[in-house]
Image (spheres, helix red, strand yellow):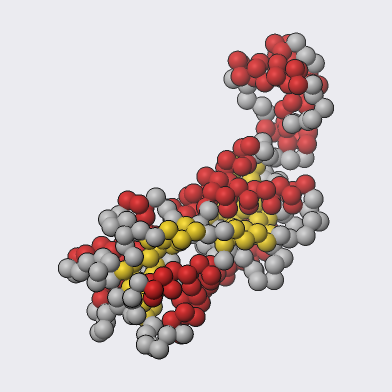
Amino acid sequence: MSIQKIAKLAGVSVATVSRVLNNSDTVKTRNRERVLEAIRESNYQPNLLARQLRTARSSMILVMVSNIANPFCADVVKGIEEEAEKNGYRILLCNSGSNIERSKSSLRLLSGKMVDGIITMDAFSTLPELTTMIAQTPWVQCAEYADAGDISCVGISDTDASEHAVRHLLKRGCRRIALINHDLSYKYAQLRERGYRTVMGQQDAGYEAIEYASDLSFRSGKAAMVKLLEADPRPDGVFAVSDTLAAGAMRAIEEAGLFIPQDIAVVGFDGSELAEMVSPQLTTIEQPSRQIGRQAVVLLLKKIDNPDAPAERVIMDWHFIARASA
């Protein structure tokens, strides 16, 4: 079905159909509805290449995530896709794993003008190289960001959230609180550890125990907890930087014949569905993951429309959800 046939079916001009497809606000409401109805009836798919040549835009956004298996990343991508589609854009997804070579491969799309902008969730440590490769292309960073603030970004206050989680464990009587962290090349890992160290450093007990999971997986969370259980004295509280790591820790605690939260209380991070699926249900810091994704698209579209606009940093609210694990 061509644009000419759509125009004939709707009883309007080809120019009117074109304006509707390009979201122009100059089309009369009645004519817009007729065109949209004709498109629905004919299952019309616009020629994206023709539109790109006509508007100098591809209406595509490249989304580079560090680990799509991470429930937090997956939820952010859902928010990105929802907001992008609402604004007439589609996404191309790259699971980069913060691997710079894989990132370079995806960023070759820039030279061919295949995408109008980029949203990344790559590790903080890769940002300098990404900045060089991305150059002037509109770019927004989710959750990870440079302190200089020259890249638009959206996330939460990881330090404040982690301090709250540790203080919650202290209030319920825990004194030997351990941290299960991840790769410190990620900014969020640095900030959540900073919050943990700040609160624990204020305690008289002088206890501090940190295990670094090899990846954000159930298996790695369990392995990290096994190491913590070998210590003497063992922890009576655990704060994990993701719900997935916390779920693995809970399994290790149960397999050691201990009880949650009576022997060891556990707090996670992210607020994913997994937190409600484990038993006992997991106390966690909930991030507004889908809203983070939507806000990233809002910031990116601003940069696409006005490349000279200053970078913006949006810090969103987090929520503490107390459940049976702590």
From the viewer's side, name the closer residue of 133 and 238: 238
From the viewer's side, name the closer residue of 150 and 277: 277
Quadrant into which the C terminus falls: bottom left
Quarter holding residue 271 = bottom left
From the viewer's side, name the closer residue of 55 and 124: 124
Residue 102 horizontal/vertical position (percent): 54, 57
**Which residue sits at x=49%, y=49%?**
75
Whether residue 235 is visible: yes
Quadrant into which the N terminus falls: top right
**Which residue sits at x=49%, y=54%?**
73
Residue 263 horizontal/vertical position (percent): 24, 72
Residue 230 horizontal/vertical position (percent): 24, 79
Quarter holding residue 213 = bottom left
Position of 259 compared to 240: left or right? left
**Which residue sits at x=46%, y=61%?**
320
Farthest left residue in view: 257
Q: How many marks?
A: 0
Vertical position of residue 26 compared to residue 61: above or below: above
